[in-house]
Image (tube, rainbow, N blue to C red):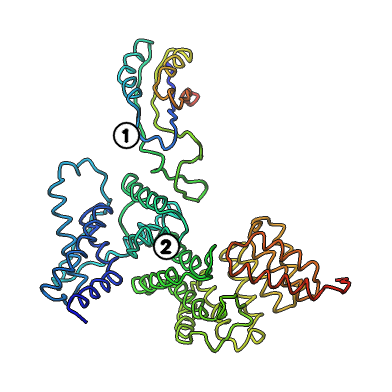
Amino acid sequence: MSERDTVERAVADAHRREWAFVLAATARVARDLDLAEECVQEAYLAALDAWARDGVPTKPGAWLTATAKRKALDVLRRQQVLRAKMPLLVEPEEVVTDSPDPDAVPDDRLRLVFTCCHPALAPEARVALTLRLVCGVATPDIARAFLVTEPTMAARVTRAKKKIAAARIPYRVPEASELPERLDAVLTVVHLLFTTGHTAPSGAGLVRVDLVERALHLARVLHGLMPDEPEVRGLLALLLLTDARRATRVDADGRLVLLEHQDRSAWDQAAIGEGARLAVEAFRTGRVGRYALQAAIAALHATAGSYAATDWPQIVRLYDQLLAAWPSPVVALNRAIAVSMADGPEAGLAALDALADDGRLAGYHYLPATRADLLRRLGRREEAAREYRAALVLVDNDTEREFLEGRLGEVVDSGAGRSSYG
Amino acid sequence: MPQYGVLIFSPAPADPMAISQEYIDRLETYPAQVEQLGGKAVTGFALQPSTTATSIRGDVVTDGPFIEAKEVVAGFFVLEAPSLEVAIEIAKLNPATIEGGVEVRPLFEPPA
């Protein structure tokens, strides 16, 4: 490998690992996210030449931070008059403690995360800002991930940054009293990122690996920064346990494989082990929230010998707790599936009926798809076919559509030539 | 003299830095017109664009103005005028009426 390659690789590596760290520290000096971003980008560019000339520093993150901060200070000196009239990032006054390590840079990543995920920003803007500022993902790539045009995504990011400045959203970590609510907003962003990647809402592939990996990385960073928060642990556990099944969710031809038929020997045992351990640790704190509960459910699935041998009654009990902590119709739908496994399809259908009256799941293709599956298991083929058709109208992901079409074919074919009385 | 709140509505996002030259010109002559008609602007403020707004309903915090509409609140001022008729005459001359509009509402005074 040439010298140049070594340096380029070191810079790319530092981009992946240190971007958030460098940007978060620079934002404190720049007092403006746009300026900070610009200076950090310039610092990474400067690193290419400087590291080729002087060698890769022992602490690339500290080098990049020092360089970006210096650039920011230069701009600030030049723009002093102009900036006096600009809304700056609001940062509370605090005592600066002398650090024994001159290279040590305060870790401001949590400030950055909480600012990007502030409840006063639109949910889709929080996700976009987090990807842009915390993960360093380029705007065109974010646009592609969320299937919007580049100008639309650029406008969304710009508007959010403007609001942070104009409305004075503070650049700080929330206080203990407000932490649960604010932390929930952060975890929601990471979880949304993961679910968007885990089952792409539309388009060809089922999984968008880049989003899944960004979400896992973010969950790990959060866990590193807030190791004692049970819900942070719960979220990381949930993502690990869910993603452990990634390789088995579609077959060699890209067709959907249900949990029931997945090759359990191909699940990522290291991820399952780590996820299950984190879930148990989260439960030990006694402060169990929705992510720890979902992780516990995922752990029961991941460690069961087979679909049939899964501890379904225990899963139903966990869903009951989850519904209490997080009254969501989607949770109720998943609970109904667990009920159908624990007490039979008819009990599951009864649970689904209650949900259909609710109305909030209208337009959610998993509702008719689940109903169709339970009816199929009961041999009520005509009703099942009707539900599969209803689900097909609503589904957007190609892999899922193909699966539903296959199931529809099965119930229609095997019913053909016979009279079906139920 | 009775006091009125005059709420100014402009097409969203109502960016005060993006108002037209006509608006600016009329804004310059407005204070004189208010006085001429016998009114007095007590205090007034323009707001930043509605894209910077945050709304709270119950315990739900959301990004954006309280009511999603084509026109949004752009600012407000308190007007002293001898009567509603005069207040309306003054309001009619407000440059916001070029594209948006204004709402005139008497201030509430707690009963003695």
Give how far across and how far down residue A366 sits, in percent: 64, 65
| Mark sitting on residue B37 | none
Q: Relative to the observer, which residue lies in front, A194 or B57? A: A194
Quarter of the image where one finds residue A210:
bottom left
- In the image, taking residue B42 as reference, residue B69 lies left or right, namely right
Q: Which residue is mark 2?
A: A186
- In the image, taking residue A353 as reference, residue A249 lies left or right, namely left
Q: Relative to the observer, which residue lies in front, B84 or A222? A: A222
Quarter of the image where one finds residue A67:
bottom left
Cα–Cα gap, marks 1 and 2: 33 Å
Give how far across and how far down residue B78 sits, in percent: 39, 24
Q: Looking at the picture, which amino acid does disc 1 mark? A: Met
Q: Relative to the observer, which residue lies in front, A195 or B43? A: A195
Give how far across and how far down residue B82 sits, in percent: 43, 12
Q: Relative to the observer, which residue lies in front, A220 or A281? A: A220
Could you tell me if the residues under marks 1 and 2 are in contact, i.e. CB atoms within 8 Å?
A: no
Q: Give the crowd class for mark 1: few <14, some 14-19, many >=20 residues within 10 Å.
A: few
Residue B55, above or below A261: above
Q: Give the crowd class for mark 2: few <14, some 14-19, many >=20 residues within 10 Å.
A: many
| Mark sitting on residue B17 | 1
Quadrant where the N terminus of chain A sits is: bottom left
Residue B31, above or below A57: above
Q: Looking at the picture, which amino acid does disc 2 mark? A: Val
- Which secondary structure lies at badge 1? helix
